[in-house]
Image (spheres, helix red, strand yellow):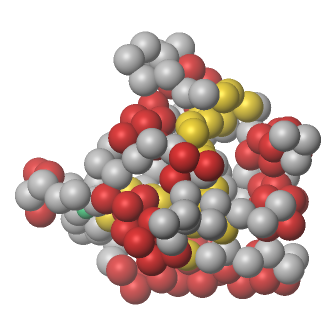
Amino acid sequence: MENSNKAIFLDRDGVINVEVGYLSNPDDFKFTEGTIEALRILNEKGYLLIVITNQAGIARGYYNEEILTNIHNKMNTILKEHSVILDDIFYCPHHPEFTGSCDCRKPNPGMILKAKEKYDIDLNNSYMIGDTLNDIQTGIKAKCKTVLVLTGYGKEEQKKIGPFIPDLIFKNLKEFAKNILNQ
Ligand SMILES: [Mg+2]
Ligand SMILES: [Zn+2]
């Protein structure tokens, strides 16, 4: 059986929106520069756009799932105003110290594997994009191509590249989107 869909798996904080540390208020949600345009380019290129995000702030009690939904509704509303369709959002609300271990918390590939089943995704021709080496490790485990972006924690993380080496490194999501257009 051949899987036909290809996807861009996107870490959220530090990639799509500005990293603020446990974002817990929709008012603090701000897109990183060029991200809306980047997502539009990737949309047009035929990729599913799927957010894969650890939200341990829920396990820690910093915010609840209703607030997280409000944040995601704001994100989706703005994207729709710009004709960008985000196909899905998978989040892990757990943290081992508070809720025990789980399969979904990155660097486990559980959320990507769930998305693969739901959308019949060819992981080898899909990308995991993140601003941390934890995201890169997740992508490697799921057998995706991996991209480190230098927004969010990216610049700090780039200095620590060792066991987990991204396939590609870009300044931000927009630079990635523009480049993949030529591949
Ligand atoms: Mg991040
Ligand atoms: Zn989890």
Residue 137 position within the rendered picture, expressed as x and y whole percent measured from the top left: 40, 35
- Identify which residue is drawn at 86% across, 66% down: 44
Residue placed at 88% from the left, 47% from the top?
181
The correct choice, above or below, for 55 with respect to 72 in the image is above
**Camera sees residue 17:** no
Q: Is residue 146 above or below residue 43?
A: above
Could you tell me if residue 79 is visible in this image?
yes
Percent across and percent down for residue 37 are: 87, 60
Task: Tell me where residue 114 sits by quadrant.
Answer: bottom left
The foreground one among 32 and 122 is 122
Q: Is residue 64 above or below residue 177?
A: below
Q: Judge left or right: residue 136 versus residue 73.
A: left
Give the x, y percent position of residue 163: 38, 17
Left or right? Give the position of 44 relative to 143.
right
Q: Nearer the viewer, residue 130 or 69?
A: 130
Placement of the C terminus among the 4 image quadrants: top right
What residue appears at the point 37 percent right and 61 percent down from the top-left corner? 113
